[in-house]
Amino acid sequence: MAIDRRVSRTRQALYDAVVRLMLRRPYEAFGVLDIAAEAGVGRSTFYSHFRSKDELVARSLERLRPVLQEGRAAQIERPRIESCQGTLALLRHMHGHRALLTALEGSAGHAIVLTAIREELARFLGAYARPGLHRGIPRQLVLDFITGTFMSVATWWLTERPEMSAEEADAMFHRLVGDGIPTGFFADDARKFAA
């Protein structure tokens, strides 16, 4: 049991260290040695837990699981879409870490973080999704659609309209997923798009 706690403490120290470094320096400007030094551990300790800086960053997003679980428990009281509870909590979490996401923009780290968030959301929603086809559409494609839409809304919100509340952004996400493309979104005359 003591080993598990020690492993957990070491990983937490590494997660915290990489976040501090990402807030201070460009993602490409630091490496494993910098992270290990920031965490107060040796290089070999780092490599006993993670293969690379990118893996550390991606795995650090596993900490979103409790955020999603707690969000689902709170949101299930007022469901909008049966399988999408937890998204409001995730948006609030992302807003709380907006400085980090902004610091990472344009770097390889930004793509790693966004991909890891999407994967955690897909894993979470997939745990509640029924197997099989849904209206003739494969389950995985539905999950990809939901998580892709979520990430589009979240990144638009954080970059274009950060003053908007998480509740408003979540409502937009649910409207898009629940209702699809708004009626009248596309012009009736296809010739307008001809080159």
Image (cartoon, helix red, strand yellow):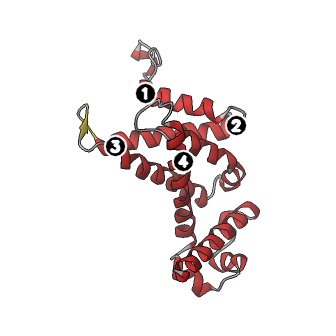
Mark closest to the chain's N terminus, 4 or 2: 4
Image position, residue 122 (x, y; %)? 42, 49
Is 93 rendered above or below residue 33?
A: above
Total marks shown come to 4
Categorize mark 1 by other alpha carbons within 10 Å: few (<14), some (14-19), many (20+).
few
First in residue order: circle 3 vs circle 2: 3
Q: How crowded is mark 2: few (under 14 residues within 10 Å), some or many (20 or more)?
A: some
Q: Name the residue under label 3.
A: 129
Q: Which amino acid does label 4 sit on?
A: Glu
| Tags 3 and 2 touching, CB below 8 Å | no
Tag 4 secondary structure: helix
Residue under circle 2? Answer: 162
Mark earlier in primary sequence (3, 1): 3
Q: Give the side of residue 108 with respect to residue 160, left or right.
A: left
Q: In the drawing, what numbered circle is on residue 178?
A: 1
Q: Nearer the viewer, residue 121 or 66?
A: 66
Q: How far separated are the C-alphas under marks 3 and 1?
A: 15 Å
Residue hosting label 4: 70
Q: In the structure shown, which secondary structural element does the residue marked by tag 3 occupy?
A: loop
Residue 110, image x and y in percent? 60, 55
Task: State how far apart marks 4 and 3 are (Cα).
Answer: 18 Å
Q: Alpha carbon of mark 4 to alpha carbon of mark 2: how far?
A: 23 Å
Quadrant for the C terminus, please. top left
Which callout, 2 or 1, points to the residue nearer the camera?
1
For residue 40, side relative to residue 144 (left or right): right
Q: Do the residues labelled 4 and 2 touch (CB within 8 Å)?
A: no
How many other residues sit within 10 Å of disc 4, few (<14), some (14-19) or many (≥20)? some
